[in-house]
C-alpha cells in the first residue's frame, strides 16, 4: 500500500499545480512528475569501484496561454518552489510566439482506463548483494578462459520509481515501475592482439535476470571469440545483423516515420504511407500493454491512450508515428507516440540462429556497430562494424575495422530473412536480420 500512497501524494501535487496554473492565467496546463530511487554498483578486477544511491524526483509543467506555450521544471517540491515554477512557466508563455498547433492533446484521445501492466516488482535495495553479483560476474569471466587478462568492469543497477501525468482535460494518473540490470565487460589478449566485449541482462522482474556467473561466461566467450580479428577486402556481400544489434536498423525506421521528421520534410520515407517499404512477408506490430514489457505504457507522454497497432503490414508502411504537435502540423490526429514507441514485435521467417547462418551462406555476420553515419533525410547508411566472416553457414574467423554501407530504402526491401530467436532486452523485439547485399569497405 505504500506505493499507492506515494502515487496519491504525487497526484495531489500535480492537481495543485494544474489549479495554480489556471488561477495564474493559463487556459490549459499539463504536468508530469517522477520519483526514482535506486542503487548503482560497479566493480573492476573484482574490487568494488563505485556504490551510488539515488533518490531523485522532479516535476515539469507546460502551460498554454491561448496558443502560447511556456514550460518549467523543478526538483524543489515545496509549496513555494512549485508556485515559483508555475509562475515562471506562465511568464515564459507570455513571451513565446503564437503557434496554432500547440496545446494539449485532444480530449477524446486522453486515456480513461488504466490497467495494471505488471511493471513494478520491488525489492530491498541491497548494495552488498549488488557488489556480490558484479564481482561474481567478473570472477566467472576470469575463470572461464586464460585469455581473459583484464576487466573493463561489471555493474549492477536497480531502480524503482513512479510516474504521474495530469492535465486540465481531467486525467491525473500514475503507475510504479522497476528495472534491474547486470552487465560485464572483459578484455582478452592473445599473440599481441587485444579485444573486448560484454554481456548484459535487464528485466523489470529481478528474479528473471540471468545469473552473474552466466553473464560473466557470456562476456568471456564473446571477448575471446573476437581474438585474432582480421580485416576484409572491399566488396559487396550478404550481411546479417545479429539480433543483439538488429534493433538499431528498426530504430532508424522509427526516426524516418516519426511526425517530427515528416513535418520538417526531413525523411526518406516522406509521402510513403500505404506503399511497400519492406518485403511482403514482414509485419511489425506495436503492443503497448505487454505485461512487464520494457516499453509498456497505458498512455504516452501527453496522456494519449496507447493501443495495439500494426505499424507495417505485409511490408506496407501502414502508420506514421504522431505526437499531438506533429499531428496538427500534418493535419491528422496523434496516435500516442509522444515519448517514443511501445514494444515493437518484428515479424520473422521462422529460422533458428543456426539456420540463419545457413541462410547467410557466405558473408558477414555483424555483432557490433559503431559510429553515427546514418542520414534519415536521404536514407544513406554507413557505419563501422565488427563481427565474423562466415562461409557455407559456418563462422570462419572474427573481423574488425570494416564499414558497411548502403541505403536504408534498399536495405529494408532487401531483407531476406529474420530469425525467430528474438532479442527481448529493449523496446524493439527482433531476431537477426539478413540483408541480401551491402557494400563492405575494408583493406
Image (tube, rainbow, N blue to C red):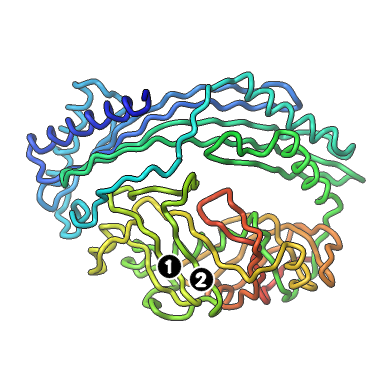
Q: Where residue 134 appears, x then y in whole percent?
A: 68, 29
Could you say which disc has been placed on residue 283 in the image?
2
**Which residue is drawn at the image coordinates 46% and 77% (left, top)?**
316
Q: Secondary structure at mark 2?
A: loop
Going by the image, does 276 lie left or right of 24? right
Badge 2: residue crowd in 10 Å (few <14, some 14–19, many ≥20)? many
Q: CA distance from mark 1 to mark 2?
A: 7 Å
Going by the image, does 367 lie left or right of 262? right
Q: Is residue 24 above or below residue 423?
A: above
Going by the image, does 184 lie left or right of 290? right
Quarter holding the N terminus is top left
Depth check: 417 or 91 in front?
Answer: 417
Quadrant in the picture for residue 309? bottom left
Q: Where residue 73 appears, x then y in whole percent?
A: 28, 34
Badge 1: residue crowd in 10 Å (few <14, some 14–19, many ≥20)? some
Q: Secondary structure at mark 1?
A: strand
Return the residue at label 1.
Answer: 310
Quarter holding the C terminus is bottom right
Depth check: 244 or 283 in front?
Answer: 283
**Do the CB atoms of the residues marked 1 and 2 lie less than 8 Å apart?**
yes
Q: Where residue 111 appears, x then y in whole percent?
A: 27, 50
Amino acid at each position: 500500500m505504500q506505493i499507492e500512497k506515494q502515487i496519491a501524494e504525487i497526484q495531489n501535487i500535480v492537481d495543485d499545480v494544474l489549479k495554480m496554473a489556471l488561477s495564474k492565467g493559463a487556459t490549459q496546463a499539463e504536468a508530469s512528475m517522477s520519483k526514482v530511487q535506486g542503487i548503482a554498483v560497479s566493480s573492476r578486477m573484482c574490487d568494488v569501484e563505485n556504490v551510488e544511491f539515488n533518490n531523485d524526483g522532479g516535476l515539469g509543467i507546460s502551460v498554454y496561454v491561448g496558443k502560447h506555450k511556456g514550460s518549467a521544471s523543478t526538483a524543489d517540491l515545496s509549496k513555494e518552489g512549485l508556485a515559483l515554477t508555475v509562475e515562471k512557466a506562465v511568464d515564459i508563455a507570455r513571451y513565446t510566439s503564437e503557434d496554432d498547433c500547440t496545446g494539449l492533446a485532444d480530449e477524446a484521445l486522453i486515456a480513461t482506463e488504466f490497467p495494471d501492466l505488471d511493471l513494478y516488482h520491488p525489492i530491498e535495495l541491497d548494495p552488498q548483494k549488488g557488489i556480490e553479483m558484479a564481482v561474481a560476474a567478473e570472477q566467472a569471466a576470469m575463470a572461464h578462459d586464460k585469455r581473459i587478462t583484464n576487466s573493463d568492469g561489471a555493474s549492477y543497477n536497480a531502480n524503482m520509481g513512479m510516474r504521474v501525468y495530469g492535465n486540465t482535460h481531467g486525467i491525473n494518473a500514475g503507475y510504479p515501475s522497476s528495472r534491474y540490470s547486470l552487465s560485464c565487460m572483459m578484455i582478452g589478449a592473445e599473440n599481441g592482439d587485444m579485444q573486448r566485449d560484454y554481456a548484459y541482462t535487464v528485466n523489470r522482474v529481478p528474479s528473471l535476470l540471468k545469473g552473474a556467473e552466466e553473464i560473466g561466461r557470456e562476456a568471456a566467450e564473446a571477448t575471446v571469440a573476437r581474438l585474432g580479428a582480421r580485416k576484409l577486402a572491399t566488396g559487396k556481400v550478404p550481411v546479417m545483423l545479429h539480433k543483439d544489434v538488429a534493433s538499431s536498423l528498426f530504430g532508424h525506421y522509427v526516426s524516418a516515420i516519426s511526425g517530427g521528421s515528416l513535418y520538417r520534410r526531413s525523411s526518406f520515407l516522406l509521402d510513403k504511407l500505404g506503399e511497400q517499404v519492406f518485403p511482403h512477408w514482414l509485419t511489425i506490430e506495436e503492443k503497448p500493454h505487454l505485461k512487464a514489457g520494457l516499453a509498456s505504457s497505458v498512455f504516452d507522454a501527453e496522456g494519449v491512450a496507447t493501443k495495439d497497432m500494426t505499424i507495417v503490414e505485409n511490408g506496407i508502411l501502414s502508420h506514421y508515428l504522431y505526437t499531438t504537435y506533429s499531428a496538427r502540423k500534418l493535419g491528422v490526429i496523434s496516435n500516442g507516440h509522444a515519448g517514443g514507441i511501445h514494444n515493437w514485435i518484428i515479424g520473422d521467417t521462422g529460422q533458428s540462429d543456426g539456420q540463419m547462418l545457413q541462410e547467410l551462406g557466405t558473408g558477414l555476420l555483424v555483432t557490433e556497430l559503431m559510429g553515427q553515419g546514418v542520414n534519415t533525410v536521404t536514407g544513406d547508411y554507413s557505419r563501422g562494424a565488427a563481427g565474423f566472416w562466415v562461409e557455407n553457414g559456418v563462422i570462419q574467423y572474427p573481423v574488425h575495422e570494416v564499414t558497411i554501407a548502403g541505403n536504408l530504402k534498399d536495405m529494408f526491401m532487401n531483407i531476406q530473412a529474420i530469425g525467430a530467436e528474438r532479442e527481448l532486452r529493449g523496446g524493439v523485439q527482433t531476431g537477426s536480420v539478413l540483408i541480401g547485399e551491402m557494400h563492405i569497405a575494408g583493406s
